[in-house]
Image: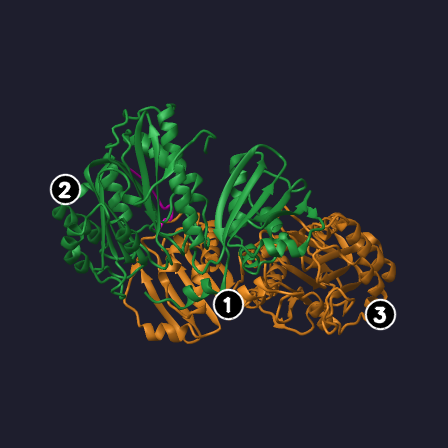
Chain colours: A green, B orange
Amino acid sequence: MLTKEFNYKVVPNGVCAAEGFLASGVHCGLRKNKNKPDLALIYSENLCQAAAVYTQNKVKGAPIYVTQKHLKNHQAQAIIVNSGNANTCNANGEKDAKTMCQTIAAQLDIEESDVVVASTGIIGQPLPIDLISEAASELKNQLSREGNDQAAAAILTTDTCQKEYALSIEIAGKTVRIGGISKGSGMIHPNMATMLCFVTTDVAIEAALLQEALRAVTDETFNMVSVDGDTSTNDMVTVLASGLAENPLITDSQSAEYQLFIQGLYVVLRELSRKIAQDGEGASKLLECQVTGAKDKATARLIAKSVITSSLVKSAMFGQDPNWGRILCAIGYSEGDFSIENVQVDLASVKGRATVCLNGSHIAFDVAQLEEILTEDEIFIYVDLGQGQAKATAWGCDLTYDYVKINADYHT
Amino acid sequence: MLTKEFNYKVVPNGVCAAEGFLASGVHCGLRKNKNKPDLALIYSENLCQAAAVYTQNKVKGAPIYVTQKHLKNHQAQAIIVNSGNANTCNANGEKDAKTMCQTIAAQLDIEESDVVVASTGIIGQPLPIDLISEAASELKNQLSREGNDQAAAAILTTDTCQKEYALSIEIAGKTVRIGGISKGSGMIHPNMATMLCFVTTDVAIEAALLQEALRAVTDETFNMVSVDGDTSTNDMVTVLASGLAENPLITDSQSAEYQLFIQGLYVVLRELSRKIAQDGEGASKLLECQVTGAKDKATARLIAKSVITSSLVKSAMFGQDPNWGRILCAIGYSEGDFSIENVQVDLASVKGRATVCLNGSHIAFDVAQLEEILTEDEIFIYVDLGQGQAKATAWGCDLTYDYVKINADYHT
């Protein structure tokens, strides 16, 4: 997705990097641990163009339905998010999600319909809405340009670390910032959207183009991540654009300015996606599978995702075992248009790179070198099909004892 | 698949239960442990009608290709199987698989093309074919009516127990026996066929009807099993019919006789499938998901498989945790034609049954009772969609520390 000429600078402050955005995070009591904030607010000083993509799970969290209604006019000014409870499969879910929007809108003196709402946590337990309502004024009072840290912490569940990333680019002589925060560790197998991710930018862009950019970029980033094959009910990626960078309004998807913006958005979402894969429940290694030489993009995507989703490949990576037969097996059961007779598989890390399969068959390799390569935390699996020009990349993580521990014996 | 009137008797001797069949198993050295037989032979005293279904993985083991050629005439008289090496993704794979058939055919004085060959074990390691050739005469000499036990042992890999089942039914006043052995523990997510399973019967039936029956029954049994979502490269189910029961030849799929036979075959394959799910790598519990009330069969099948394949559901069952939200999530991301507003989910075991979700939402339930239900080794998950008459059942197992241990740190 990136051209060779694309330049950007990494900047601090995640969701507060762009002009006009404040954030906060507080502990309202949904999570038992008082040191863990569980309610986040992102606020823009002016009304923003807004875009979002959502989970394709037929079971959807109540906040998804409310947010979809609120974004019909492609505008928003605030995002409220709680962790500790997904507000999904509850009798009063939509009512509670609306109450969250009403309460914070009243505090901020904005329209209820300009609030995006999201929830993450356990499914099927009634949401203690009073805890949220009582915390609304503190949440507003804590808003600041330095609030990114608290907001990034408040949206986490089983995540072991905060996930934030921001960069700046130049568009038509103006500095444009794009930054975001994300969460996600288990129930990660996004389909058309993903886990919670909130992006802010000060670019000036038409809402329809913002939506187009978001959909194109999530297809190449969040939709190429899998931790455990389970597509969540509450996945959502939202982007708010304040326009305060004062670049000439982007109105044409063929323009150089749009191409710059979409590349910046790609880098932000790719980094936030990788952080989710890396922090997959129980994960000790990030796996990146790059498929090249496919006849078409769809086939490349299916194979890349199949490899990083295979429990047997994931277990082998945890065991630092160069068992390429399992990789070939996962390629083989992918749907898509390909044959395997030309396939080459390489394994790599910062320790080096080695071919483990050539023309679909066993070749001799140095086992000690391979085992050394696989000791690293980031493992690259290169699959070349030798049948065309299409390519795709997917991200996942290894399958460890801790994944089972976290999911068999968890407590909120 | 079963009518209320269907009667059968369980009988001993698995693959040797039917008239005319002998079996043996020896240690030829493919596996390091000398106490584990690793080469099996099933032999019929007369030429049989034969049918088979195979893996849909695009990467197929060499034995699959050789067996497909040999069964073009729908006849076979012997089956040779090794464990410890899958003979897949090897440069000389087909040549070695052919050599296995030639060698045993010469010993048995039958046609090479009347031998079915199968291999299971590690992918991508050259097969030490000499070990097999050298053991061929002993394999033949050991053949006996009591050889089922040795053959059932010789086809195992990471399985913790032998899998055999046989029954007898009455067809047109004659006693017909159907029995089989199977293996499979990891890389289990059959698609159109499954792990290794060898069935023998003395029924007299036309080859085309035998194939039709096998395909219909595997769709309802092996194709509804998943241990880890990985479809193997070597899956195969074969049935040999000797005709020695002397029932009038079955030639009509609408006949009462065919209906009796297919029900008998269903019970045998269902029991062998369940044994594979129950013995899934690291498994401590068998999971059975029964979906009812679907609009169509395809939807019922997709949902049942989605539930028993979900890593999060599997981990929760290991943890004896009635986390029905994860079940609803797995229903929701199934493909198929359904809505979830009427869905009811019950959990059950021999300790009792309790509803955990009604009309797609949380209902109050007795947590202590649920936890007691989930202590058992066989857990039933009932999903009623309330939208039609179609139903399906799928089998799986829980996800445990031992699954990771076996697959991260295994040795042959």
Instruction: Pinpoint residue A89: horizontal percent, then vertical percent.
Output: 30, 56
Magenta-highlighted residues: A51-59
Image quadrant where residue B180 sits: bottom right
Instruction: Pinpoint residue A139: horizontal percent, then vertical percent.
Output: 18, 53
* Distance Cα–Cα, label 1 vs label 3: 42 Å
* Distance Cα–Cα, label 2 vs label 3: 88 Å
The residue that mark 3 highlights is B141
Q: Of the residues shown, which amino acid type is indicated by label 1? A: Tyr
The residue that mark 2 highlights is A110
Is B135 placed above or below A265 here? below
The residue that mark 1 highlights is B401
Q: Of the residues shown, which amino acid type is indicated by label 2? A: Ile
Q: Tell which subunit mark 3 falls on.
A: B
* Distance Cα–Cα, label 1 vs label 2: 50 Å
Secondary structure beneath label 1? helix
Q: Tell which tag, 1 or 3, sits nearer the viewer.
A: 1
- Left-right relation of A97 to A293: left
Q: Tell which subunit mark 1 falls on.
A: B
* Residue under the point 31% across and 24% down: A251
